[in-house]
Image (cartoon, rainbow, N blue to C red):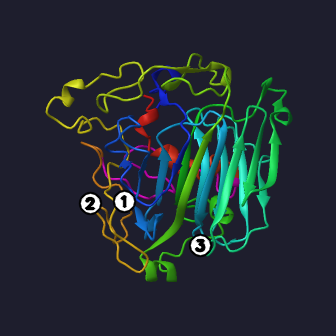
Amino acid sequence: MSFTLDSCVPAPVCKDKTYKMDSLDRYQDIGKYLGDPAKADWVGQGEPVVYNGNVLLTMPKNSVGTVMASTTYMWYGNVKAKLKTSRGAGVVTAFILFSDVKDEIDYEFVGVDLNTAQTNYYFQGIPDYQNTGNITELTNTYDNFHEYEIQWTPDEISWLVDGKVHRTKKKSETFNATTNQYHFPQTPSRVQLSIWPGGLATNAKGTIDWAGGEIDWDSPEIKTYSYYFATFGQIEVECYKTNSPPGTNKGVSYYYNDARGTNDTVVDGNKRTSLKSFLGTGTDMDAGSSASSGADPSASTVNSVPGGSVNPGNQVPGGSISSSDGADSSGGGNTGGTGTGSAPGCQSTEWAQNCGGTTNNKNDGVRGADRTLGASAFAVVIGFVALLCL
């Protein structure tokens, strides 16, 4: 799918907010969300579950896991997530910031190393693997809640755990002489939470090795709970406070006025963020509006939302999987149901869902080529409507 920045749907501006994560009342599946943040705080795909006052992101057998993203965007600021990671070879938990132009700031956790948080950042998706850094002073991230924080300003990024700064990267250190610009994350970004199968057997060797080996779909975790899971408690967002760009949040939406996609091309304006139907784009947000008269505007036949919709089940640790919308719990890997309209089911033939389109070729044995965006690559594939670019 090709896109231009002017066809992207404007993104809702940053709002200070504390998300208790004790219900899914403010969560919508991507098969229903049309870009109005008044109707949902989180949008995603997979099978999130509320358990003991927290949200579990689950990964049933032979699935591609679960991802949730905030419906509003941060243009600098602080974000904190209280979480417990998943565990097991090949199982990856992530808490990241991710923008429409693929600027990214990460925490990633590999399930075989429960004492380490991997941190990383990317500028517009460019794979520079010198950007990574590990935080190794943690205690059993599966059993214990820790508070992970990203402090992001126009000048630097700091990664904190339980209130202690463990890593700082200054923008001044990221200048690239070849491109003559700073390779520093600088554009409005969503908060994303995910669990995904880095160790899927069909992944390239580099990805599997990085993720700690192949996933065991018959592990004690699967046998006991029917899924792997990561536990997310309170999420806090504090927007950057400034009177002039970059980093303001005075309007309704963020959008771009130039294809360079840098912070000097971001507009903090008053364009609306919601589509009339899934036929809409940033250049024609009212396309398919006839669907809104007496019909569900999301019930378009256009194949624009990979994976379709999945209604969260009632699973809890120790319970059984209650798949819906055609999900195949017998090993077919179809966690996406039958799709939206004529969309085909999504098969977990890769670590990201393949909904009838082509998959990227992987360079076997090379971590960089097949894991360009880390955990966010899973989230990119499912195509949130709030940033739909056609």
**Residue 247's quadrant in the figure?**
top right
Res 326 label: 2
Q: Report the front residue among 32 and 349.
A: 32
Is residue 283 toward the left or the right of residue 294 in the image?
right
Which residue does the image show at 53% across and 66% down from the upper left? 230
Which residue does the image show at 45% across and 44% down from the upper left? 358
Res 335 label: 1
- Quick one: label 1 or label 2, which is nearer the N terminus? 2
**Residue named by callout 3:** 87
Is residue 311 toward the left or the right of residue 365 in the image?
left
Between the residue at mark 1 and the residue at mark 2, the CA separation in whole angstroms equals: 8 Å
Q: Amino acid at mark 3?
A: Arg
Which residue does the image show at 50% across and 68% down from the upper left? 229
- Quick one: label 3 or label 1, which is nearer the N terminus? 3
Element carrying mark 1: loop
Q: The magenta stretch spans which residues?
A: 344-367
Q: Is residue 351 visible?
A: yes
